[in-house]
Image (spheres, helix red, strand yellow):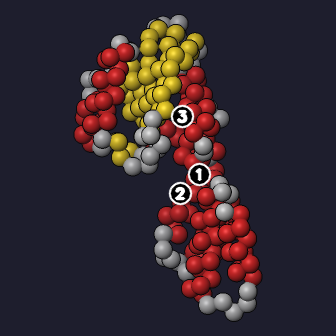
């Protein structure tokens, strides 16, 4: 990836390059920088494209997405970091989720689509088993996935399930949780949690 970045930078140094080729070089340079997680420099390239060619490809949505990730370190880790950093962040969320609680993590399951953390929570008012499920995807989480999660909560005899996603929950998923011991955290609520853990 570093070689590609170097090549794109060399390409941009040439004089008299047609605008469409210049935009393509910048776009590819930004994509390479995103892959190396250098969001700050990627955003510079994307904003340069936006200035000279508003509406070029998906530049506007990329700027919005990566600007947010560049400003929010925890969200960046949640969405883009390696598996071990992501799991470390999830552990921090679990251990700080309930104020003044003693938290004992009993199990961590890392699967392709989600990560589960089973924790014993002991607060001055109550003590119970809580299962946290973390989805890294920015898409919609549906009812079927929550039915599976609810089954796991019952099977483990946990008191509650907390489901977090960087995306959204479908209307059916929200309806399914009514009257069930499930708390849903979509991207907005997840952001609040991520900001609170610093």
Mark closer to the observer (2, 3): 2
Q: Are marks 3 and 1 in contact (CB under 8 Å)?
A: no
What is the distance, in whole Å, between disc 2 and disc 1 at their CAs? 6 Å
Q: Position of residue 63 (x, y in %)?
A: 56, 63
Q: Residues within 10 Å of mark 1 (few under 14, many from 20)?
A: some
Q: Are marks 2 and 3 in contact (CB under 8 Å)?
A: no
Q: Nearer the viewer, residue 115 or 95?
A: 115
Q: Are marks 2 and 1 in contact (CB under 8 Å)?
A: yes
Q: How many marks?
A: 3
Q: Position of residue 98 (x, y in %)?
A: 53, 20
Quarter of the image where one finds residue 67: bottom right
User: In this orientation, does residue 196 appear?
Assistant: no
| Nearest to N terminus: mark 2 or mark 3 | 2
Q: Position of residue 142 (x, y in %)?
A: 30, 41
What is the distance, in whole Å, between disc 3 and disc 1 at their CAs? 15 Å
Looking at the rendered structure, the secondary structure element under dot 2 is helix
* Image disc number at residue 193: 3
Q: Nearer the viewer, residue 142 or 72?
A: 142
Mark closer to the observer (3, 1): 1
User: In this orientation, does residue 119 appear?
Assistant: yes
Q: Please, is residue 15 above or below residue 49 in the view? A: below
Q: Which residue is mark 1?
A: 69
Looking at the rendered structure, the secondary structure element under dot 3 is helix
Q: Residues within 10 Å of mark 3 (few under 14, many from 20)?
A: some
């Amino acid at each position: 990836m570093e070689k590609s970045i170097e090549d794109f930078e060399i390409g941009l140094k040439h004089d008299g390059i047609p605008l469409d080729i210049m935009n393509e070089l910048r776009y590819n340079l930004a994509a390479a920088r995103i892959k190396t997680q250098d969001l700050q420099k990627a955003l510079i390239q994307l904003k340069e494209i936006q200035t000279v060619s508003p509406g070029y490809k998906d530049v506007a949505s990329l700027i919005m997405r990566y600007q947010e990730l560049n400003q929010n370190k925890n969200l960046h880790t949640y969405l883009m970091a390696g598996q071990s950093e992501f799991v470390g962040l999830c552990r921090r969320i679990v251990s700080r989720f309930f104020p003044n609680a003693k938290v004992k993590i009993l199990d961590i399951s890392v699967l392709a689509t989600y990560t589960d953390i089973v924790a014993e929570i002991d607060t001055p008012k109550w003590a119970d088993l809580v299962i946290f499920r973390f989805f890294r995807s920015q898409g919609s989480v549906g009812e079927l996935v929550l039915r599976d999660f609810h089954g796991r909560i019952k099977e483990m005899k946990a008191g509650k399930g907390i489901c977090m996603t960087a995306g959204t929950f479908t209307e059916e998923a929200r309806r399914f949780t009514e009257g069930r011991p499930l708390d849903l955290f979509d991207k907005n609520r997840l952001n609040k949690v991520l900001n609170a853990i610093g």
